[in-house]
Amino acid sequence: MNRRQALRLTAAGAASALAFPRVLRSASAAAPKTYPHGAVIGGFRAEEVGAEVLASGGNAVDAAVAGALVSGIAGPQMTGPGGYAASILIATADGKKVTAIDANSTAPAAARADMFPLDEKGRVKGRIDEHGWLAAGVPGVLAGLQLALDRHGTRSFADCVQPAIQLAREGFPLPANIAGGIRNLAAALGSSPGGRRLFFKHGAPIAAGETFRNPELAEMLATLARRGSVDTFYRGDIAARIAEEFAKHGGLVTAADLAAYRAREVAPLRLAWDDAEIFTAPLTAGGLTILQTLGALRALGFAQQPAGLTRTHAFAEALRLAWADRLALLGDPEHARVPQARLLSNDYARESVDRIRAAVRGGKILAHRAETRAQPGTVHLSAVDRNGLMAAITLTHGGSFGSCVTVEGLGLTLGHGMSRFDPQPGHPNCPGPGKRPLHNMCPAIVTRGGRPVFAVGGRGGRRIPNAVLTALVEHTVLRRPLAAAIAAPRLHTEGTPELSPEPKWPADELKALPALGYKVKTAASATLSAVAFDPATGECSAAMR
């Protein structure tokens, strides 16, 4: 993409102002769009940018990365170059390689298991794990996007970042939802000089409709583009500036922590179901929970069970078991003993099925402890090109605006990866030097007959794994097409008796579920972005809900 194309894209985006709602309408699950050159779906302004990259000969990875970078400018509350993590899945068009890129945040060397003191209710005092400089670890987004391009793209970082630079420099009318978020978090966002400069105008939070610009971030990204990579963000003058701000404000991340950081290409988790294979991101991502649940459903003979209350009961209990294990047992496997192999084994699936069947026969729910926790603030993009190469990229700040601190002089708002640790010392997911926190991102790709046919991921915190699981069950297990898979109603649980089906869940089941022991309250699910590819026709389609 050249500078003229980038200017045209950002000018068009500024004219329409609220491009994201337009994308949602044009990519409704009821009528998925088809595309001649491939498709990118999800994010903020990513559809237009990705389409231009694909039309000009770029591949799905190029398009997804360009879309991710511009999303970090247009959706600053969700993610950005200072986002704490990215989780990426890529499948080559011939299906011979499906790979994952882990760009999760790492805790600084000075992190301790007890660094977040708890009050009498077990909550972190002052929420210092969520807002402030202690909440931020080493940000991984830029390293992950660079690695994806280096290993699997055809365009340079300098090419892919141009629309983001232009949008940050020229600005765009601030949507009401982002302005509301700034207003609600004004105290936290205004706690750093960089945040006051970026998110305030004449001493007040910037209002909806006003032009939102980030010239400092534009210059930082332009500097990285001129240098040909993001390396100096981690090892160089930009890294030194970031470390200086951490030190100045009592944060723990140092220049050495930044220099030690590496995104890495890793093997994805995989599960076979009939003639399909499901691939998803490994720990510390949320994919293990998805495959653990799928293993139990496969052992249950889920595909052969008729729809109705009994199947829903079994589905919910499989999820509750996986979530109870997730919150009690999972963490960074390089720093804690995590029983990954057992949780994904056929033996454990059969044990789980015995418990699930006993609960269903008894008309009750399983008893175990778990705690819910809200975790918003994420973007997901799925992409496919005309050849069938697929990419699924999830990237995040964590909660809205992440740590709510901005590096002065760089316009860089930092995610709060440290909030994803469990503050209880001794927990597998407690903080520690160099540890990666457990997170909910779980991009997934399905191959059938050896070719990638479906890519999906979501945004919505802890609701992501369950929503992605539902789409995989609908598309891969129940053999429903893209539109039906994304439109299907979803339910959410985190292991507690609380069950949150979407309002369009069958009414008779909503009435019957409380008698089984569930505390039922309808609620929205995560937002999924998915693409599909038909190897026989070469047709690419996309849907988002």
Image (spheres, helix red, strand yellow):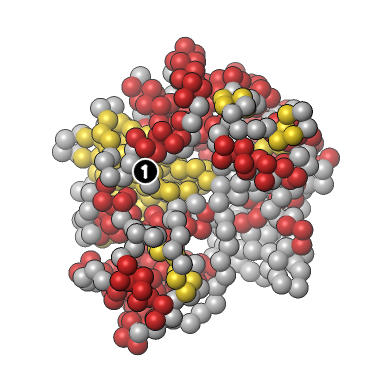
Where in the figure is residue 172, as x and y percent of width and height?
56, 25
Residue ID at (73%, 57%): 127
> Vertically, is 268 above or below 170?
below
Q: Is residue 395 left or right of residue 35?
A: right
The image position of residue 541, as x and y in percent, is 27, 37
Residue at coordinates 68% horizontally, 25% vertically from top-left?
Answer: 216
Residue 115 lies in quadrant: bottom right
Quarter of the N terminus within the rendering: top left
User: Would residue 188 be visible to someone looking at this image?
Assistant: yes
Of residues 294 and 466, the one drawn nearer to the viewer in this rendering = 466
Give the image location of residue 522, x and y in percent.
44, 63
**Which of the two residues, 90 or 28, is positioned nearer the viewer here?**
28
Q: Which of 205/219 is in front?
A: 205
Which residue occupies the extreme left position in the image? 536
Residue 133: horizontal and vertical position, in percent?
75, 46
Residue 255 appears in which quarter of the rendering? top right
Q: Which residue is mark 1?
A: 544
